[in-house]
Amino acid sequence: MDSVVQLQRQLVDYTASLFHEGFLDEQFNQLQQLQDESNPDFVVEVVSLFFEDSERLLNELAKALDQQSVDFKRIDAHVHQLKGSSSSIGAQRVQKVCIAFRNYCDEQNTEGCLKCLQQVKHEYSLVKTKLETLFKLERQVLAAGGSIPLPI
């Protein structure tokens, strides 16, 4: 039983650090509150869709920025989508880079867009790793017979 409490504490601390470091915001808490016995994998499913969506959009963005003549309207549409899906799961740092990215689209600044693409990729891979670790910790707590502490 001791290890369950330890795992739960680890999970709580880890989750708190994600909020503290700005990886996640209040929206992630709201997602967690929508999860219940009837839908125990809700958060994992929503976040998995976010991963799929983001990877598709990041590939599209890389392709669009690699063109001879850059279509900033198209790029802006992709960034807008990425901003929407990242804010829907509370991936705050990805969302913030998207805001800067859209400003460069408005200015039709290819250099700025390329720089933001690198930043978005970086923030996305960070939050993806962090969320995968979070879900792994949750699975360990459940496997040890514990329950997931609800967000405060």
Image (tube, rainbow, N blue to C red):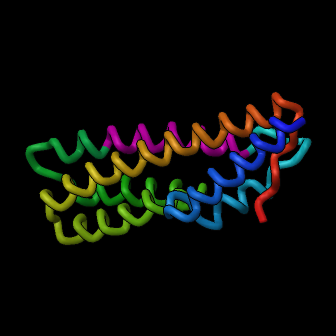
Going 13% across and 58% down the picture, which residue do you hit?
Answer: 111
Q: Nearer the viewer, residue 143 or 104?
A: 143
Q: Quadrant of the N terminus?
A: top right
Question: Where 60 sits versus 115, above or below?
Answer: above
| Residue 19 rendering spot, x and y as whole percentages | 58, 62
Q: Is residue 19 left or right of residue 34?
A: left
Magenta part of the chain: 43-60
Quarter holding residue 31: bottom right
Q: Quadrant of the C terminus?
A: bottom right
| Residue 137 rendering spot, x and y as whole percentages | 68, 38
Quarter holding residue 93: bottom left
| Residue 97 rendering spot, x and y as whole percentages | 36, 62
Q: Nearer the viewer, residue 41 or 103?
A: 41
Q: Is residue 31 left or right of residue 47?
A: right
Does the magenta stretch mainly form a helix, a strand or a loop?
helix
| Residue 6 rendering spot, x and y as whole percentages | 77, 42
